[in-house]
Image (spheres, rainbow, N blue to C red):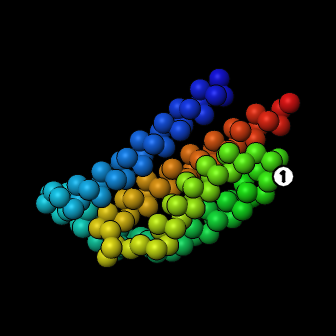
Amino acid sequence: MKKKLYIGLSGIQVLLLIGAYLVQDFSMKRMGMMRHVMFTNQKWEKSYPVETIISVSVAISIILLVIVVYKHIKRKSYYQLIETLVVSGGATGFVLLNSTESFRSYYFICLILALSILIQYVKQIIDIKKTDSF
């Protein structure tokens, strides 16, 4: 059961990352999508403290990443550690190194990557509970 859930969550992660690529690709090629993305960016910047939300999310992600790295080094399970480092580190790096000037769909991609990181941590919780029950 847990293995099926783990595989299903991995599939959802892959679909989310493909979706992030497609959002960026369509926002550069399709004028309607470009307008929608730019309008939504402006609306979100006026309505929400986007930079504060992103900063807090990055800080939480880094703290959780440190905890997960500690747990995996303690248990000596390096495959999940590498997977977590790639997903969480890559997403956090993208969020820190880019902005709406470099990627028009930056806020959309940040939301998709945040969901991907959340799924990654759920997978880690499933994995930790699976190995701790033995």
Task: Please tell me which residue is depicted at 13% across the width and 60% down the height of the picture.
Answer: 31
Task: Tell me if I can see residue 65 in this picture.
Answer: yes
Tag 1's secondary structure?
helix
Residue wearing tag 1: 74
Compared to 43, does 25 lie above or below?
Answer: above
Foreground of the two, 89 or 30: 89
Horizontal side of 41 relative to 4 (left or right) equals left
Which residue is farthest top?
1
Foreground of the two, 50 or 123: 123
The total of numbered circles placed on residues is 1
Compared to 20, does 49 lie above or below?
Answer: below
Which residue is farthest left?
31
Tell me which corner region of the image, top left, top right, bottom left or bottom right, holds residue 89.
bottom right
Horizontal side of 97 relative to 102 (left or right) equals right
Task: Please tell me which residue is depicted at 32% across the width and 68% down the height of the picture.
Answer: 103
Disc 1 residue crowd, few under 14, some 14–19, many 20+, Cα 10 Å: few
Q: Quadrant of the C terminus?
A: top right
Pinpoint residue 99: horizontal percent, then vertical percent: 39, 74
Task: Please tell me which residue is depicted at 33% across the width and 73% down the height of the picture.
Answer: 102
Horizontal side of 125 relative to 96 (left or right) equals right
Type of amino acid at the residue the image marks with label 1: Lys
Pinpoint residue 83: horizontal percent, then vertical percent: 61, 49
Tell me which corner region of the image, top left, top right, bottom left or bottom right, holds residue 4.
top right
